[in-house]
Amino acid sequence: MTSLDGGVGKTTLAAAMAYHAAVDRGQPALLIDADWEKAELSQLARAEHGPGWLSPFLTGEEPRVHKIRDSLYLVPGYDAAEAYQSYDFQISELEKALEAWVEGLPAFAASRGLPPAAIIDTTPTLRLSFLTRLKEKGVRIVFVADVRAVSRVSDIKAEQYASYFRLADAVVVNHTSFFARDAAPYTIRRVPTPKDLHWEAVAKAIIRNRHNRKTVEALLHKVFPAP
Amino acid sequence: MRLDIRRGIQLLTGRADPEAGRKIADLDAGEQAAPAASQPAAPQPAPPPAPSSALRPATLVPAAADADAEDWRDLLVRLLSTAPEDVAQKLVGCLDREVITKALERRNDPYLKVALMLITKK
């Protein structure tokens, strides 16, 4: 899950996709919170503080997989968010660690009885060269945007969006109104914010809307096609 | 601060295999030191599109086969599968059946095994 701008709803869409897969479809799901700027998914899921996805590379510790619900697991990202704030990191270091996760995930998942596929929530504006490398490894890229993607802000912005669109396997426009629901192949309609900002409440609020549920279903088919 | 990519991937995969994550670790090393002049980097052909490592449920092809450099069998199969059909047919017609069988034997894939059994059936 990637985006150009922050706050477009990557994390909530990732939560909705995982919820729909695990709860509605009965298909185990694994989330990796690789948003090294905020680790918001870990917070939404109330994951315990502990070694997350970066720890194997940072301290040599095993990541603690957090079971957030039956058949739904999360590798938290607090360690990466703290490291990002505390150390003088090169972004390329974090990119390499995430790339290593993509390589090591099948073995990691198999040895722990986890689903072999993961939804990786990321930080906004990942470099195109990095996304290209991930794509070459078979990662499917879901690019999430809001209406800024379909309303021309400037030529530069339009070109930036175009570069990400070219790489993406699916482009989702979030927070659309009823009338703009066909603005992109995948759109998510704006829904009322739940009082309880817990991942499950947020996910349910999104997929309670019939149009959104169809979008999430279609996205899951797109990124996790049946073997 | 630098991350230890090699250690990380060994921990994830549970293998003390130096080959695990080699490509990424090498990327790491490549940034620190340029390749020695006595060992110029050989030009690598573009790798075939890899199946998703994050998404594939199980791998039919041993990792070692993926990691090996392409040899003539890979190139031949790729040529035949991407050439226009009439050209591919002409090429297949010129090739010894044993050559094609050898090329197909390169992959440890159950579907290919069955195809090979059919081809070599007398």
Image: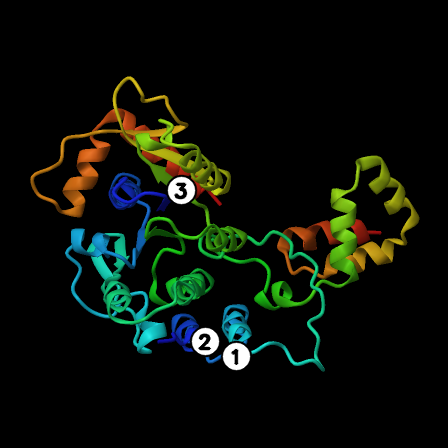
Q: Give residue B58's position: percent from left, percent from top.
A: 49, 57
Which residue shows up at 31% across the image and 65% down it?
A53
Binning the other alpha carbons within 10 Å of mark 2 as few (below 14), some (14 to 19) or many (20 upward) gives many
Tell me the chain of label 3: A
Name the disc covering residue B6, or none: 2
Outermost residue toward the left in this view: A195
Tell me the chain of label 2: B
Is label 2 in contact with label 1 (beta carbons under 8 Å)?
yes
**Label 1: which residue?**
B18
The kind of residue tagged 3 is Val
The kind of residue tagged 2 is Arg
Q: Is residue B81 above or below residue A30?
A: above
For this rendering, which residue is in front, A114 or A95? A95
Which residue shows up at 30% across the image and 53% down it?
A31
Name the disc covering residue A40, or none: none
Q: Is residue B118 visible?
A: no
Outermost residue toward the top in this view: A179
Which residue shows up at 14% across the image and 41% down it?
A201
**Label 3: which residue?**
A142
The kind of residue tagged 1 is Pro
Q: Give residue A68's position: percent from left, percent from top.
A: 20, 55
Q: Give residue A7's position: percent from left, percent from top.
A: 25, 42
Q: Give residue B102's position: percent from left, percent from top.
A: 79, 60
Q: Left or right: where does residue B118 sit relative to residue A165? A: right
Asked if marks 3 and 1 fall on the same chain, the answer is no
For this rendering, which residue is in front, A110 or A189? A189
Asked if marks 2 and 1 fall on the same chain, the answer is yes
Q: Is residue B91 visible?
A: yes
- SS at circle 3: strand
Q: Is residue B43 above or below residue A132?
A: below
Q: Is residue A67 above or below residue A12?
A: below
